Structure formats: C-alpha cells, structure tokens
C-alpha cells in the first residue's frame, strides 16, 4: 500500500462519507454530550487544517490540526482510519504528519481529546507511544468521565 497525505477536499463525496462514518462511530461509543467529532461545516474553520490519506484513489483515513486560541498550541482532531485498514500503521503515519506540521508552526504543545471507553484503547496506545501524556481538560473542554485528555510538549 502506497499512501499519500494531502489537504482534504471537504466537498468530495467520499470525504463527506468518511466524516459521516467517523461521527456515527463516535456516537456509537460515546454519549452524544461527550462526542466531540467535528461535522464537515466545522472543518471549514480557518484555524483548522484537514488532511486526507489515500491509497491511489481510495480514501483510507483523515486527520486534522486545530490552532488553539493562544496561537502557540494545537489540537489533533478528526483522526480516523477506515475500519478495514486499521492496525496497518496508517494512524501512525497521519499522527507523524500532524506532529511534523505542528513543529513547522512552532507550536509548543499539541493536545488531544479521545474516549475513555475500551474501543479507544488503540488510539490512546498510539498517542502514548508518541510521547503524549494524560492532562486535564484544555480549551473549552470540561472534565468528563468519557474523555481522556492528552498533551505532548514540543521542543
């Protein structure tokens, strides 16, 4: 599999379908009030950069980086790999791409929110393996037993 990462076409039918599937999966595993998955319209915000991963013409995943209000930190958003391709390193590739972009932007920290449920254990393990550690809520998030908040301090 040769995967490319490029800016996402938020209007493409397959990308819209991927985000719909991501949102549905998040609602299956988290209560609605604890689901922070973005809808397509929210992804068009100027502080958000969204990428897609493709194997040739086939959309296999996505990820995003949001500039936080302090201008020196970012938040990972919309990390998703199509179910049939999970476990093959695509999430790791997208995470490395996002972190490289955060470093190019001279961010001092990168945060994320993910679920506390067992379904999110692979995601938490991925982030921990890349140096993310648990932290408290950040930005507009509130303490929530269904959420795990993580941060990585950049050099």
Image (tube, helix red, strand yellow):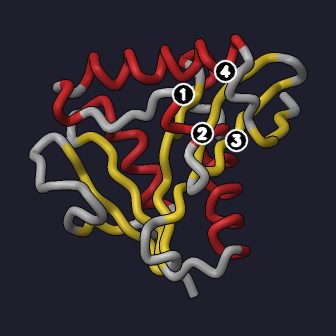
Q: CA distance from mark 3 to mark 2?
A: 12 Å
Residue in the image at 32% along x and 38% along y:
36
Q: Nearer the viewer, mark 1 or mark 4?
A: 1
Which one is in front in this view, the residue at disc 4 or the one at disc 2? 2
For the residues labelled 4 and 3, the Cα–Cα distance comes to: 10 Å
User: Residue 139, located in which quarter of the rendered image?
Assistant: bottom left
In this figure, which residue is indicated by the disc labeled 3?
51
Callout in the foreground (1, 3): 1
Residue 44: mark: 2
Mark 4 neighbour density, 10 Å: few (under 14) some (14–19) many (20 or more): some
Disc 1 + disc 2, Cβ < 8 Å = yes
Q: Measured from the top left, where is residue 4 in percent x and y?
A: 84, 38
* Residue on which disc 1 sits: 40
* Residue 146: mark in rendering: none
SS category of the residue bearing label 3: strand
Q: Are marks 1 and 3 in contact (CB under 8 Å)?
A: no
Q: Earlier in the sequence, mark 4 or mark 2?
A: 4
Query: Does residue 79 lie above or below 83 as drawn?
Result: below
Q: Quick check: 4 left or right of 50?
A: right
Q: Position of residue 98 (x, y in %)?
A: 64, 57
Residue 5 position (above or below residue 39): below
Q: Which residue is mark 4?
A: 15
Q: CA distance from mark 1 to mark 4?
A: 9 Å
SS class of the residue under badge 1? loop
Quarter of the image containing the N terminus? top right
The disc, 4 or 3, on the residue closer to the chain's N-terminal end is 4
- Residue neighbourhood size for the residue with mark 2, other residues' Cα within 10 Å, grouped as few (<14), some (14–19), many (≥20): few
Marks 1 and 2, Cα distance to the nearest angstrom? 7 Å
């Amino acid at each position: 599999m040769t995967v490319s990462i490029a800016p996402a076409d938020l209007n493409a039918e397959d990308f819209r379908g991927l985000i719909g599937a991501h949102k549905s999966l998040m609602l299956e595993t988290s209560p609605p009030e604890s689901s922070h998955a973005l809808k397509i319209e929210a992804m068009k915000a100027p502080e958000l950069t969204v990428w897609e991963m493709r194997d040739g013409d086939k959309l296999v995943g996505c990820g995003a980086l949001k500039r936080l209000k302090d201008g020196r930190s970012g938040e990972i958003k919309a990390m998703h790999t199509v179910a049939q391709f999970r476990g093959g390193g695509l999430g790791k590739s997208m995470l490395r791409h996002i972190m490289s972009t955060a470093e190019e932007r001279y961010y001092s920290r990168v945060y994320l929110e993910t679920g506390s449920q067992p379904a999110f254990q692979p995601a938490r393990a991925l982030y921990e393996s890349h140096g993310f550690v648990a932290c408290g809520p950040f930005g507009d998030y509130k303490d929530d037993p269904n959420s795990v908040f993580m941060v990585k301090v950049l050099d």
